Image (tube, coloured by chain):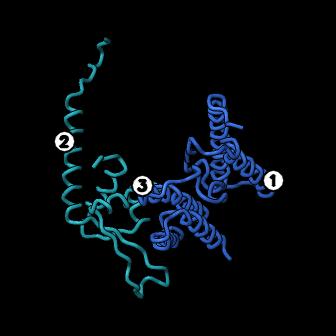
Amino acid sequence: MKLTGPLTRVLSVFLADVSAWRYGYDLMKAARLPSGTLYPMLARLQEQGLVTAQWEQHSADAGGRPPRKYYQLTGEGVRVARLELAQTRTATRRTTDGTTRPVRGITP
Amino acid sequence: MTRGLCAQRIAQAVILHACRGLPDDIRDERFREWAAELPAIMCDSDIRFAILRSARALSYAAGTYRSVRYLRRAAGKPRTDGRQSGVTGDAAVGWASRSRRHPLAPPRYPDGVLPAIAAVVIWLILIVLVRAYQPQGPVIFLYISAGILVDILAVVAIVRFIRWIRRQSKHPPRS
């Protein structure tokens, strides 16, 4: 899985509460992504078996609105997401630590 | 019909049009899924102004064209002419979707025409609105945003037109 910035954000949102079911607009807002980026990503994750989806059951508090489709990470999705995000964090830390910074007052 | 409801209907129509490009087996489900998000956008209390909620709903709907392109590819149904079917979809998203034409697609009209038309239309609407209603308060920011949008569209139109001319000069269409 190639971890891009938007994918990292989506996985982080999912991992914030792995038991929560999230609908598209909720994810868009939380991950600050447009619909044209989010839905292809969700479709890809679903194809890979990392995300599962289900339709909302009709309930009284829905207020007559149409049922939404909700998404949640699968068990495998949680495992892979945690692993990938941890690896990314480690790689970022390593890059940051290895960077030399110019000392103030000394011009090269 | 309120303006919010009108915007929701337009967004729904845009989504419906986008979904026409999907294979039969997933079209209905995708339309239901995407259209069901519109009430949530229109009732989003985090967006203060109704007009911004309407704009969000329309931008959401326009974004579904990009999703449709991915889902079509995933379903193994590549575009045949390098464009979505129909015209209104292009008019609605055109520049925003950053669609690239298939290199073998027959040229129908120069690239950059749609953003140019959109820029002129928005510019004319702006002029009419500014003359009719003096902008006051936060509405000024909307006018400024629309002005910036016109500028961006104009730049996109020029860039795409120049690229199109270059492409035509390198690979002239066979008569």
**Left of B173 or right of it: where is A88?**
left
Q: Which element type, helix, strand or loop, lies under badge 1?
A: helix
Q: Position of residue B24 (x, y in %)?
A: 49, 70
Q: How many marks?
A: 3
* Mark 1 lies on residue: B131
| Tags 3 and 2 on a common chain | yes
Residue type at mark 1? Arg
Q: Residue at x 30, y 47 (%)?
A: A3
Residue type at mark 3? Arg
3D distance between C-alphas at marks 1 and 3: 36 Å
Q: In the rendering, what colour is chain A?
A: cyan
Q: Nearer the viewer, residue B3 or A57?
A: A57
Q: Are marks 2 and 1 in contact (CB under 8 Å)?
A: no
* Mark 3 lies on residue: A32
Q: In the rendering, what colour is chain B?
A: blue
Residue type at mark 2? Thr
Q: Residue furthest top?
A: A108
Tell me if residue B162 can be seen: no
Dot 2, crowdedness within 10 Å: few (<14), some or many (≥20)? few
Work out which quarter of the rendered image holds the N terminus of chain B and state it: bottom right
* Mark 2 lies on residue: A90
Work out which quarter of the rendered image holds the C terminus of chain B and state it: top right
* For residue B167, above or below residue A52: above
Q: Residue at x 66, y 42 (%)?
A: B112
* For residue A29, above or below residue B111: below
Q: Nearer the viewer, residue B7 or B47?
A: B7
